[in-house]
Image (spheres, rainbow, N blue to C red):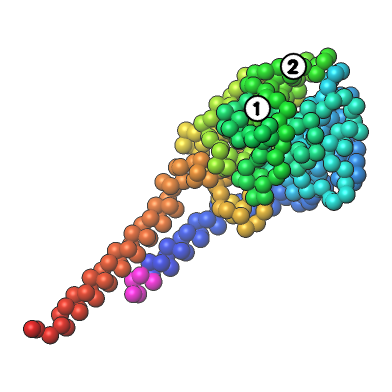
Amino acid sequence: MRAWRLLAASFIGSLLLGCAEQLVDSKDIWGDLRPGQNYAPASRMIDGWYAVEAIDARTFAINEPKSEQYNTSYLIVGSTRAIMFDAGCGERPAGSKSMREVARRLTDKPITLILSHHHYDHTGDAASFEDGVTLVDRPELRARIDNGRYTIGALESGGAVPPPLKVAGFVKDGDTIDLGDRRLSAYNLPGHTNESVVLVDRVRNLAFTGDHVYQHLGGIVAMTPQSDLPIYKANVDRLLALTDANTRYLGAHGDPHFDRAWVSLIDSELGKMVAGTATYRYASHYLVPGKMPLRVLQNGDLYIYTTPWVDPSLFWSKWSLLAIAAVLSLALYLLARLFRLLRGRSRSRPEA
Ligand SMILES: [Zn+2]
């Protein structure tokens, strides 16, 4: 018994020491940042909740700096209609204006809603766009349409299933969206999620990147069941090919602006993850303490979160090998005890 206790204590001790040595703490990532602080300084507040930045006279970043993840949605206006790219995080205070009402203050053109992807923090006021949502054309999305309505799954919506959304239409990878005197190219770039959409305005050289890439203290997320590292890397390559050195990139979290150097950095770090040459730290949580344990690749301000689901090499790390060794030792020890017990019983049985 003493041998087992010694083994268990040394295993737990070394595991704790090893993890503590590499643990990413939330203050490493967030610093002293508090909700309400992270948005572009040129913004004006609406309703005490939305920080609206005019990127130009007809392009608006609508940030929610007091939300848990500092979400940013976009209103992109043309001469005949406008695109609302994302519908808010769903955390706005009761009685405050919906994302649609904010968009209505900024344009009188008909508004078409397109979601950058279906995670809960981008779909908050989607149902308030009564003309419906335009979905990226993928078979698994079409399969979930019932009676002209699409229901976002519980996994994407963070547990509670949101009301079904009226489907206004579909946009295919590479399609051009005509807003009158302005055109957007739509691309389906899976990686963060399968349905991830990036919109590109070639004339203004703007790329609206959703959660595919963004520059934000919280870090890039490649940890959902849909996340796929080789596909993610291939589609960051594709974004680089679709844009150029002068493109202004606009992401869906925090102060939205970032440049091509940031996209290139994400691309090269994803490349290390795919090649199996990345060095990881460990995080006890992503944003909210108490959530699942994660591995983090860090390079300066860049954090890329991943998990064993999308990064199987975790199973071959020294820590998982140590855990396997401990479980095997325990199994062998229990077998030996059982064997001794059975042998003792058969010896003590009286002869017939
Ligand atoms: Zn997301």
Place of residue 321 in the rendered image (x, y in percent of width and height, measured from the top left) = 39, 52
As rendered, which of 254 and 80 lies closer to the eye? Answer: 80
Q: Nearer the viewer, mark 1 or mark 2?
A: 1
Q: Main secondary structure of the magenta part?
A: helix
Residue drawn at x 73%, y 45% as measured from the top left: 69
Side (left or right) of 30 relative to 282: right
Give residue 136's mark: 1
Ligand 1 within 8 Å of disc 1? The answer is no
- Residue bounds of the magenta highlight: 1-5
Crowd tier of the residue under label 1, counting other residues whose Cα lies within 10 Å: few below 14, some 14–19, many 20 or above? many
Side (left or right) of 23 relative to 151: left
Residue drawn at x 71%, y 48% as measured from the top left: 30
Crowd tier of the residue under label 2, counting other residues whose Cα lies within 10 Å: few below 14, some 14–19, many 20 or above? some
Secondary structure found at label 2: loop
Q: Which residue is mark 2?
A: 202
Kindly identify the amino acid type of the residue bearing the numbered disc 1.
Val
Question: Image quadrant of residue 131?
Answer: top right
